[in-house]
């Protein structure tokens, strides 16, 4: 499911960035839906409510702490993709949060519809950025580091992380609702369904870029 890719850094970075743009839109749709954000974004919004700054700023600051912890545990510097993920998602979240047309729905049906759209957009964005093969984000870097250090099962490591940040975020006043629980159950199957499609799409894009570059080289020769 997770392809290892080499070369074509420019094209892969473009795919990676587009994926983060899409995933960040999903994050904001979930937050604005008022149906419940992801566990990590419950934490980020809770920090925003209690301290200030912006949701995107807290996403970046928490990411710095997480990457530092991952580096200490794993005793190695995380992949460049983790740093780009941390920075770009925070910037993109704040960008979308400022857009006036992305606002809280006025009905329960609207909340459910925005939540459903948000989780699909989130999963698709995650699939696109991962398909670029430039590494995963800070949370997954920490999960991998703890897994390698302790030998615990991946699902137990990630599940423990999600529960801890969700409880802290809820205590801080973050947006916990029925959607938060539903997201935890739905994101895995939805991501599993879209990831192969995202890999195929990226294969097509990279192949077209490769052929275009080869054609330009042959013309130049």
Image (cartoon, grey):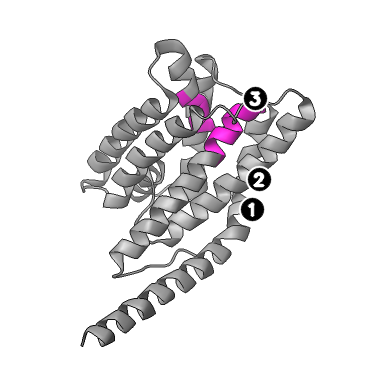
Q: Does the magenta-highlighted stretch encompass residue 40?
A: yes
Query: Pointer 1: what residue?
Result: 189
Q: Are marks 3 and 1 in contact (CB under 8 Å)?
A: no
Q: Are marks 1 and 2 in contact (CB under 8 Å)?
A: yes
Residue 142, compared with residue 64, is above or below; it is: below
How far apart, in angstroms, are the residues tagged by discs 1 and 2?
6 Å
**Residue 107 pos. (x, y %):** 77, 24
**In which quadrant of the rendered view does residue 12 lie?**
bottom left
Q: Secondary structure at mark 1?
A: helix
Q: Residue at x 40, y 61 (%)?
A: 132
Which numbered disc flags the more N-terminal residue, 3 or 1?
3
Which disc, if any, is residue 104?
3
The stretch in magenta equals 26-44
Q: Residue at x 31, y 82 (%)?
A: 214
In the rendered view, does 173 fall on the left or right side of 186? Answer: left
Query: On the rendered image, what quadrant is the C terminus found in?
Result: bottom left
**Is residue 138 visible from the viewing direction of this image?**
no
**In which quadrant of the rendered view does residue 192 lie?**
bottom right
Q: What is the magenta segment's predominant secondary structure?
A: helix
Query: Pointer 2: what residue?
Result: 186
Q: Secondary structure at mark 3?
A: loop
């Amino acid at each position: 499911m997770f392809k290892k890719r080499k070369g074509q850094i420019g094209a892969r970075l473009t795919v990676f960035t587009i994926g983060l743009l899409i995933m960040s839109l999903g994050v904001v749709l979930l937050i604005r839906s008022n149906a419940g954000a992801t566990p990590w974004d419950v934490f980020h919004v809770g920090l925003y409510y209690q301290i200030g700054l912006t949701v995107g700023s807290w996403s970046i600051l928490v990411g710095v702490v997480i990457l530092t912890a991952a580096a200490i545990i794993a005793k190695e510097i995380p992949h460049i993709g983790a740093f780009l993920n941390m920075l770009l998602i925070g910037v993109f979240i704040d960008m979308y949060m400022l857009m006036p047309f992305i606002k809280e729905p006025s009905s329960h049906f609207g909340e459910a519809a925005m939540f459903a759209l948000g989780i699909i957009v989130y999963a698709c964005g995650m699939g696109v950025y991962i398909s670029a093969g430039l590494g995963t984000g800070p949370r997954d870097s920490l999960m991998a580091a703890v897994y390698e250090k302790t030998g615990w099962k991946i699902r137990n490591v990630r599940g423990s992380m999600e529960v801890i940040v969700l409880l802290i975020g809820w205590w801080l006043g973050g947006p916990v609702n029925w959607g938060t629980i539903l997201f935890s159950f739905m994101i895995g199957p939805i991501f599993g369904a879209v990831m192969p499609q995202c890999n195929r799409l990226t294969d097509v894009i990279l192949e077209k870029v490769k052929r275009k570059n080869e054609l330009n080289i042959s013309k130049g020769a």
